[in-house]
Image (spheres, rainbow, N blue to C red):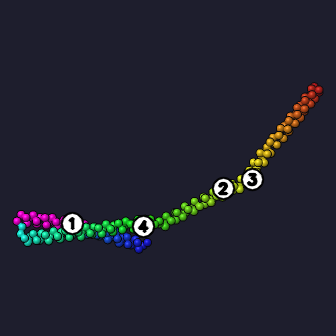
Amino acid sequence: MQARLKQLFDLLSRSESLADQADKFKTSCREEMQRLQAHLASLQAEGGSSDAAVRLAQLAATHTEATDRYNRARAVVAEKTREIARLARLIDDVPSQAELIQYKRRFTELYEEVRSSCRRVGLQRAALPSLRATCGYVSHALPRAYGAACRLGRSWMRRASTTQRTTCSCASATS
């Protein structure tokens, strides 16, 4: 990882250096072109000699060659810049130690949550048969209990009415 970072920084510094050189070269070419155009204008004004024409042709060839070198250097700088961008994307794709710790903690939390949910479901499933048995017992016992309560209630009502009559008759007899 350190070697890649060092390589990336070296490529970045080289790219910046090449870009600076390209800018300086471009500036010098412009100055040279302006000087040559001024010289050409002065030669044309004089009527031009054959030596001047030869010199001008040589300078034009030199300028063309310099422009070609500039374009090649620019292509190299572009290639290095693309390589730097590719390496930067590779470095950004690797999670840091802090991110890995955070991922681990979150996965542990999720695991515990799922495990507790599974335990609750297991307990509910274990309790389901006993709840069904209780429900069945209650559904069978409830009508019997209701019937017994009704019979008991009627007998109590009969006793109460008999006791009332007796109490009432005793009370009226003594009065």
Q: Nearer the viewer, residue 163 or 172?
A: 163
Place residue 114 in its image quadrant. bottom right
Distance between mark 4 and mark 3 Cα atoms: 59 Å
Amino acid residing under circle 1: Thr
Mark 3, other Cα within 10 Å: few <14 / some 14–19 / many ≥20: few
**Viewer-proximal residue among 1 and 77:** 77
Q: Main secondary structure of the magenta part?
A: helix
Instruction: Please name the residue shown 82% across and 43% down the image.
Output: 144
Q: Which residue is mark 2?
A: 121
In the rendered structure, does residue 37 fall within the stretch colored magenta? yes
Earlier along the polypeptide chain: callout 2 or callout 3? 2
Q: With respect to residue 149, does 54 lie above or below?
A: below
Q: Label 4 belongs to which residue?
A: 90
Label 4 environment density (alpha carbons within 10 Å; few <14, some 14–19, many ≥20): few
The residue pinned by badge 1 equals: 27
Q: Is mark 1 in CB contact (under 8 Å) with mark 3?
A: no
Q: Which residue is mark 3?
A: 130
Please say if the residues under marks 4 and 2 sit with CB atoms less than 8 Å apart. no
Q: Quadrant of residue 41?
A: bottom left
Q: CA distance from mark 2 to mark 3?
A: 15 Å
Secondary structure under tag 1 reads: helix
Query: Which amino acid type corresponds to the residue marked 3 in the rendered image?
Result: Ser
Of the numbered discs 1 and 3, the one sitting upstream in the chain is 1
State left or right for residue 91 relative to residue 35: right
Q: Residue at x 33, y 66 (%)?
A: 81
Disc 3 secondary structure class: helix
Mark closer to the chain start, 4 or 2:
4
Q: Which residues are magenta?
A: 22-47
Instruction: Give me the C-alpha separation between circle 1 and circle 4.
Output: 36 Å
